[in-house]
Amino acid sequence: MVKITEPAAQKVKEIQKAKNTENAFLRIHLLNEGCSGPNFGMTFEESITEDDMLYEEYGISIIADIGLATALEGVIIDYNESDNGNGFIMLREGIGHGGGCGGCCGNCGGSC
């Protein structure tokens, strides 16, 4: 099950408002498998399919292909602001980064 922190949810809402996509789903997709595990990306989508899992938290509807269920187990989407830049990160509960930049909606070259 995917979780999202409140700061990340607020940032997603800000991005949705700026892009006029307030009703869109936040889709998590697999970018690639890195040496430290899967690297995920995020985009907005207007619809959900029968092959999607749906998670809702803090008013954000998160979807992902059911085939990613195992890879996304324990993943937490967070938003980090630092001197090195701002961006979404994906953490695995009890482990830390879930691979690479993780989320990709911030300034790390993402696609949202």
Image (spheres, rainbow, N blue to C red):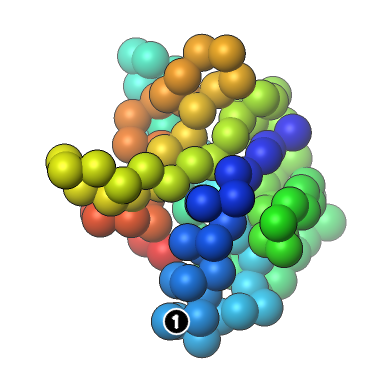
Quadrant of the image containing the C terminus: bottom left
Residue positioned 74% across, 40% down in the render: 66
- Locate residue 78 relative to residue 84 in the image: left or right: right
Tell me residue 49's x, y (percent).
Answer: 77, 61
Q: Residue furthest bottom?
A: 20
On the question of residue 53 being in view, the answer is yes
Q: Residue furthest right?
A: 50
Tell me residue 81's x, y (percent).
Answer: 31, 47
Q: Is residue 84 above or below residue 37?
A: below
Tell me residue 31's x, y (percent).
Answer: 42, 40
Q: Which residue is mark 1?
A: 19
Residue positioned 45% across, 71% down in the render: 15
Callout 1 environment at 10 Å: few (<14), some (14 to 19), or many (20+)?
few
Image quadrant of residue 47? Answer: bottom right
Image quadrant of residue 39? Answer: top left
- Locate residue 72 relative to residue 16 in the image: left or right: right
- Locate residue 51 relative to residue 6 in the image: left or right: right
Three-letter residue code for mark 1: Lys
Quadrant of the image containing the N terminus: top right
